[in-house]
Amino acid sequence: MHNDYINIYNNLVKLTRNKSLYLSLKNNDTFSDRLIVLLFHFAFFLKIYKDVISKKEAQVIFDSFIRQIELSIREIGYGDVSVNKKMKEYVNLFYTILEKIETWEFLDNNKKIETIANFINIDEDNDKFVNYFDKYREFISNNSLKNFTKDILEFKF
C-alpha cells in the first residue's frame, strides 16, 4: 500500500482521537462512535478533494482507507464473519454520511446538528460537533491534499 494513503488514514485517525470531541456525547464513547467520527472526517476529506484528484485515485484512497479500518477491526479481535458484516455496515454508513454532508455548507446549524445527531449520540442542542466540522472543512479547503500525505501532522484549527 502506498505510504501517502496510509498517511492520509493516520492523519484522519489523529484528528478523530481528539478527546475533547467526545466530552459532549450522551454516553461514554465507544469504538463505534470513534469510527463514525472517523467516517465523518473522511467524508469531508473526499468531498473537498474530489475535484482535485481523479476518480481512480479517489477510489484507491477509499479502498486503502477501508482496508485500514478492516485491519483495525480485526486487531480488536472480531472473526472473519463479524468483520465482513461490520465492514458492510460501516461502508453503507459512510455512503449515507457522504450523502448527508454533500450540502453541508448550505445547511443551517439546526440541520447540521440534526445530521450529526442521526449518527452520533449527542444532545440535540449541542453544536460542538458542528463548530468542529465547520472548522475542519475550512481547514482542509485551505490546505492542499499533499499536506495530508505527509507524516502525521499537527493540526490547528
Image: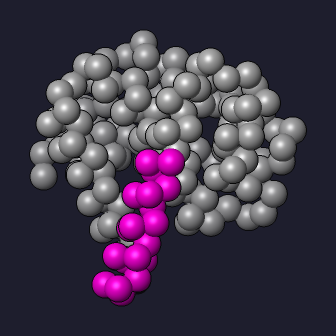
Q: Is residue 20 visible?
A: no
Furthest-top residue in view? 142
Q: Residue at x 69, y 32 (%)?
A: 112
Q: Is residue 129 visible?
A: yes
Image quarter where the C terminus lies is top right
Residue situated in front as seen by the camera: 156 or 34: 34
Furthest-right residue in view? 125
Classify 56 as above or below 52. below
Locate residue 148, reporting x and y percent: 31, 31
Residue 47 falls in image quadrant: top left
Residue situated in front as seen by the camera: 42 or 155: 42
Classify 99 as above or below 133. below
Q: Main secondary structure of the magenta part?
A: helix
Locate residue 143, reporting x and y percent: 37, 16
Residue situated in front as seen by the camera: 145 or 114: 114
Extent of the magenta region: 76-96
